[in-house]
């Protein structure tokens, strides 16, 4: 966060006036701070002394408006970063969903090919016509079809940022205390 170079209030009532001024300006109210009169009332309700005219002087002396502008810019910068991050996550999620859809279509097509080719190989075997190449090809198609989804799921599982080793899992498991009531 960027620090401002303006003089900072030193008295408790001045500090509190600045805090209320900045905290009252939120996104929901369009970053419009509380009126000086309301700030004075809140400070008085907290047991400190301040008038709206003294808060007006502090506002100029301690650059309340510049500090509010800095707060707004900082919030907007953070929102932009979060928005960029959100878009990147959304794009990655959409790409993963698209891959799953394509993967499902490929698996469906391969099952049809495997079924038709398997029927041919089965008929050949029933008629004592053994073609080792066809049998090997049928085996390869079935192997690729049945393991494709597992490989896709493995890729998704490994897409996470952090991986936990078996030792870490064992250490976490050993750290668990179990109390047995009789």
Image (tube, grey):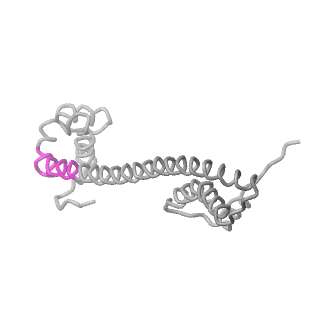
Q: Say left or right for 168 vs 55.
A: right
In the rendered image of this protein, does residue 49 appear above or below residue 142? above
Q: Which residues are magenta?
A: 57-73
Quarter location, residue 2? bottom left
Residue 58's spot in the image, x, y percent?
A: 15, 47
Q: Say left or right for 56 vs 181.
A: left
* Magenta: main secondary structure: helix
Q: Say left or right for 49 vs 179.
A: left
Residue 148's spot in the image, x, y percent?
A: 57, 57
Residue 70's spot in the image, x, y percent?
A: 19, 53
64 in magenta: yes
Q: Nearer the viewer, residue 76 or 148?
A: 148
In the rendered image of this protein, does residue 65 appear above or below residue 169? above
Q: Nearer the viewer, residue 97 or 157?
A: 97
Residue 32's spot in the image, x, y percent?
A: 18, 37
Question: Residue at left 63%, top 67%?
Answer: 165
148 in magenta: no
């Amino acid at each position: 966060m960027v620090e401002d170079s303006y003089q900072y209030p030193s008295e408790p009532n001045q500090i509190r006036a600045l805090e209320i001024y900045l905290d009252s300006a939120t996104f929901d109210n369009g970053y419009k701070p509380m009126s000086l009169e309301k700030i004075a009332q809140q400070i008085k309700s907290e047991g400190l002394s301040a008038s709206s005219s003294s808060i007006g002087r502090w506002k100029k002396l301690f650059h309340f408006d510049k500090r509010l502008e800095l707060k707004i810019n900082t919030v907007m910068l953070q929102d932009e970063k979060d928005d960029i991050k959100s878009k990147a996550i959304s794009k990655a999620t959409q790409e993963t969903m698209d891959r799953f859809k394509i993967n499902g279509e490929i698996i469906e097509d391969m099952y049809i090919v495997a079924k038709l080719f398997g029927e041919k190989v089965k008929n050949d075997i029933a008629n004592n016509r053994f073609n080792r190449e066809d049998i090997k090809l049928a085996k390869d198609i079935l192997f690729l079809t049945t393991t494709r989804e597992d490989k896709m799921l493995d890729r998704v599982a490994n897409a996470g940022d952090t991986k936990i080793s078996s030792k870490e899992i064992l250490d976490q498991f050993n750290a668990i205390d179990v109390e047995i009531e009789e």
